[in-house]
Image (cartoon, helix red, strand yellow):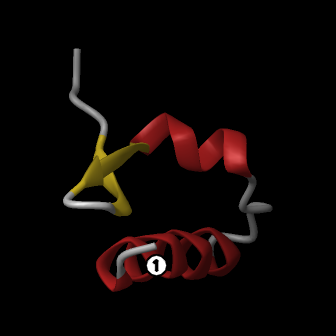
Amino acid sequence: MHPIGMARFHHFECVFRMMRIEPTVIRFRVFHQMHCSQGYYSFVQRAST
């Protein structure tokens, strides 16, 4: 996993814990989607609709 992807995941976890909401994969996927580029997996912001 790319370091920037890990930073996004860690940021999500910290923000949710500060708001006293359990950070889960389902909640993370509401805001981000997995992306593969040049052999590295990372997370990108999900497009708003």
Crowding at label 1, few (<14), some or many (≥20) Cα neighbours within 10 Å?
some
Residue sitting nearer the eye, 45 or 23: 45
Above/below status of 47 relative to 38: above
Residue at x-position 79% and y-position 61%: 22
Q: At 40% across and 82% down in the image, what residue appears?
A: 7
Which percent across, then down, holds residue 35?
33, 46
Question: Measured from the top left, where is residue 11 in percent x and y?
Answer: 46, 79
Image coords of residue 13 (percent x, y): 61, 74
Q: Is residue 48 above or below residue 12?
A: above
Percent coordinates x, y for residue 3 in the rendering:
36, 85
Q: Nearer the viewer, residue 29 or 38?
A: 38
Given the current orientation, which residue lies at the most extreme top position? Answer: 49
Q: Residue at x 46, y 78 (%)?
A: 6
Q: Residue furthest front?
A: 39
Residue 42: image quadrant is bottom left
48, 2: nearer the viewer: 2
Count of marks, rendered view = 1
Quadrant in the picture for the C terminus: top left
Left or right of 38, for residue 34: right
Residue drawn at the location 75% of the way across and 53% of the way down: 24
Direction right: furthest residue: 22
Horizontal side of 28 relative to 41 (left or right) equals right
Q: Amino acid at mark 1?
A: Met
Relative height, residue 2 to residue 46 (above, below):
below
- Label 1 SS: helix
Residue 19 located left or right of residue 20: left
Q: Which residue is mark 1?
A: 6
